[in-house]
Amino acid sequence: MKEQKRNKGDRGRVNQGGDAESVANLGKRGIEIGGFHRLGSSNYLRGTIPSGVGNLSRLTYLDLSSNNLSGYIPFEIGKLRSISELYLESNILTGSIPPSIGNLTDLSFLYLHKNKLSGSIPQQIGMLKSLYKLALSDNNLVGSLPPSIGNLSNLSVLRLYNNKISGSIPKEIEMLGSLEKINLSNNSLSGEIPASIGNLTKVNSLYLSANNFHGSIPQEIGKMRSLIDLELANANLSGLIPASIGNLKNLSYLYLHSNALSGFIPSGIGNLTNLIELFLQCNKLQGSIPWELGKLESLHQLILFNNSLSGFIPEEMNNLTRLVAFEVSENYLIGHLPQQVCLGGVLESFTAHDNYFTGPIPKSLKNCTGLYRVRLEHNQLIGNVSEDFGIYPNLDYLDLSGNKLIGELSSKWELGKATQLRVCDLSLNHLTGGIPKALGELKLLFKLMLNDNHLSGSIPPEMGMLSSLVNLNLAANNLNGSIPIWLRQCESLLELNLSVNRLSGGIPSEVGSLSFLQILDLSQNFLIADLSHNKLFGFFPSTFDDMLSLTSVDVSDNQLEGPIPDNKAFREASFEAFRNNKGLCGNITSLEVCSSKLSSNVDRKKNSKIVIATLIPIFFTLHLVFVVFWILSSSKRRERNTENTPRVVASDNLFSVCNYDGKMMYKIIVEATEEFDSKYCIGVGGHGSVYKAQLSDGQIVAVKKLHPLPEGGVGDQKAFNSEIWALTEIRHRNILKLHGFCSHPQHLVLVYEFLEGGSLEKILRINEQAMEFDWIKRVNVVKGMANAVAYMHHDCSPPIVHRDISSKNILLDSDYEAHVADFGAARLLKPDSSNWTSFKGTFGYTAPELAYTMQVNEKCDVFSFGVVTLETLMGRHPGDIISFLSSSVSSLTPSCSSSAPFNQLLLKALLDQRLPSPREQIAAEVVFVVKLASLCLHATPQSRPSMQQVSQELSTRNPPSVKQFHTITISQLFDSSCYTS
């Protein structure tokens, strides 16, 4: 009865009249409103729910779900005393749940989830003694669970997840003897899990993850013998895993990861023969892995990484022939890996890195064709890679570094057929032979680490086909020949290390061309060229002068001569970077000054560049003089008119009034930061250093002191004015609040609210914080960013383009609410302005069109938003994934079976591997967000959605549930029929 098909022809607004015959056709008498012949779910209805709905006193069923209804739930809804089913979920309803809801004593189904309801759950909810299902999830509810909830004796399903409910679980919950499903996850619940919860013997699903409990898991949980799914992850639990958990014979899913659990893994878990998934990672578990786990023959996933487990892996693990994921990395395990770990042939993820394993690679891996991730690095494994590995068409990540492996990368291994491979790290082993030409077939490869082996021969030209390569390290081998000119084909290359080999010949000019490609690809990393300990000779090519992104260089122990390139990396390099060469010279202290004859030969090649480089500053200097003169004239006129009138910025703190000279504010700031002492510095941005300061009234603020420029600070004043005027024009919950500012002769200073969560970039970088940053929080951060940028683009007049949206400029508060910060590059898009500008932004986040045009518009922010969104879900900068997705959406041909290599990459492989894969509804949202972010990366700016469209889609769209999330590929993102139920 509740499931009704959406009628796409029904569109309109719910009338506000209030009389029953203008509200809905909900009875048997054919009453209509506004042309609707039936008023059910998914009709694209908008507007508010009219108070007149309360006049339908004989109504028994009301379904207004999956519309765009906004406003409050009317108090009059409490008059529907005959109603038994009320469905208002998946709308945009706000306000609190009206206490009058307690009058609906015949109500069996109350669905209010997926709205924006706030306030606490009313005590009157306990009056609904007929209630069978209560769903209030995905709202903004606060406060504690009312004890009256214990009166709902008929309640079977209780779903309150994804809210901000606090306090402890009331002991009255034990009175809900009919409960079968409880989901209180992703709230702020505290206290201990009550022992009385063990009396709920009919419960088959208990979800309490992502809360802030203290204490241990109660022994009484072992009485809940109907449990099939028990999820207590990321809940701040400590103590031992209770032995009584072995009584839960029906259990299929046990998630206890990301807590502080200690002690041993109970051997009684071996009695849970129906167990499919066992997640115990990221705890403080000790002792050995109990052999009894080998009895879990139905087990698909055994995840034990990041604990303090020791001892051997029991031989009984070889019995687990249905394992899809076996992950025991970051422990203190010794002995051999289980040789038959892939006896069933279904293993996909095998990680055992950072342990003390010895012995051979498991023989069963050779025929384990479904593998997509193998990480065995940092052990003491032995074996012959030529014989131990097979063909892996789905392999995405391979790291065997830091072992004692021998053998050759020969055709026996057929590594070239691992066409999905993105990371290959075989460094720090004892591999011999040459680099196989077949590596050129790995078109998705972006990291190749073969350093510190005994490889010989030349670097094959086929590697020039690796156009996605970002990191190439072939150092410390016995490679010979010259540096290949095909390097210019590796358009994404950021890191290059060819040191400690036997390379000879000159440095090809093609290496220098990587500088421009670095900027064109807009990467967030920096190019590192290390050519030391070879036999290179000759002069540096002139193209090296253009390698603007170069930050570190080492050309020692070669036979190079002549002037060093004129760029920052060479000028700032130490003597060690140039030692033992034939005759390098240059204007640095560690080298001799070049002779005039030698310099003139080089200079002639640069004359055309010098002319251009001279004319451009002259033109801009003249322009700048005119601008400064105009500003000074305007300032004098303003001073005469304003007579030093104070400017009001806020009214609730020390910075309520800021005089133009800023003396009072500057004094306060200097005292609080002890004259900007480095111990208060919490970050350095593109335009200034940020300090944490506690003021005399106890208030904590963030103070940004803009970087001074040696030319007199005009550029800083421009950045300062840009940020001030942008911030004083906008007020939004997702935009960092400005408390005050001052323009002092010594410093330009901004004072913001202080957010204790830090930047998005920092949270993603630190493993502990990233693992607490779950999928729901990440999706909410994306929504907050979208709301902020949409406001800037569409609700400000004139619109404001941020131009520097990056993970460093997204700050989070203690509730993981996103705040867009750093408006130093902000640009007002005035209708009569050409909006041409100098380059702004952060490499890796700026739109590609800014490499060839300086015309700024809102679509530049849209692209940056897409990059940050992907970074939020991937846990790292997407790097080369940007270009892949950009080309995918630019030539969009949705197909469930696209043959393009990248399109067959699994979505789950892109996501942050530090979190368990998203499930159920959050999985659907993650898929939808990745799809939306991809559309923002379209190569053509006009084809990108507006931020208003993005914000509305994220706020109102309820993505359909997905089936088999782990099988979704990139190509299927754009054809929902491939993965929706």
Image (tube, rainbow, N blue to C red):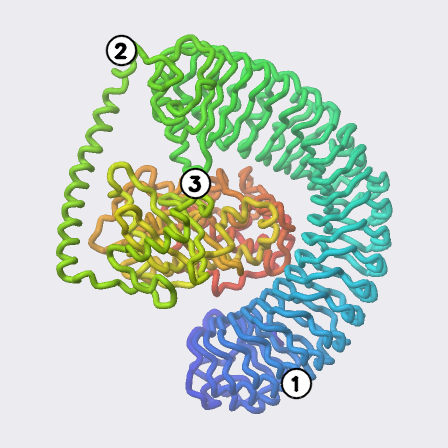
Check disc 2 and give the amino acid type.
Ser
Q: Is residue 524 above or below residue 20?
A: above
- Looking at the image, which residue is at 77% across and 37% down? 333
Mark closer to the observer (2, 3): 2
Cα distance in 3D space between marks 3 and 1: 56 Å
Cα distance in 3D space between marks 1 and 2: 95 Å
Query: For the residue labelled by badge 3, is the local secondary structure a helix, a strand or a loop?
Result: loop
In the picture, the disc for residue 127 is: 1
Q: Is residue 56 above or below residue 531?
A: below
Say left or right for 156 vs 8.
right
210 or 135: nearer the viewer: 210
* Earlier-in-chain disc, 1 versus 2: 1
**What residue would you read off at disc 2?**
596
Mark closer to the observer (1, 2): 2
Is there any visible trace of residue 936 in the rendered image?
Answer: no
- Looking at the image, which residue is at 32% across and 56% down? 665
**What residue would you read off at disc 3?**
844
Q: Is residue 450 above or below residue 642?
A: above
Disc 1 crowd, CA 10 A, few/some/many (<14, 14-19, 20+):
some
| Residue contact at pointers 1 and 2, CB within 8 angstroms | no
* Earlier-in-chain disc, 3 versus 1: 1
Is there any visible trace of residue 659 in the rendered image?
Answer: yes
Check disc 3 and give the amino acid type.
Gly
Cα distance in 3D space between marks 2 and 3: 40 Å
**Residue 781, position in %: x, y?**
50, 56
Check disc 1 and give the amino acid type.
Met
Query: For the residue labelled by badge 1, is the local secondary structure a helix, a strand or a loop?
Result: helix
* Earlier-in-chain disc, 2 versus 3: 2
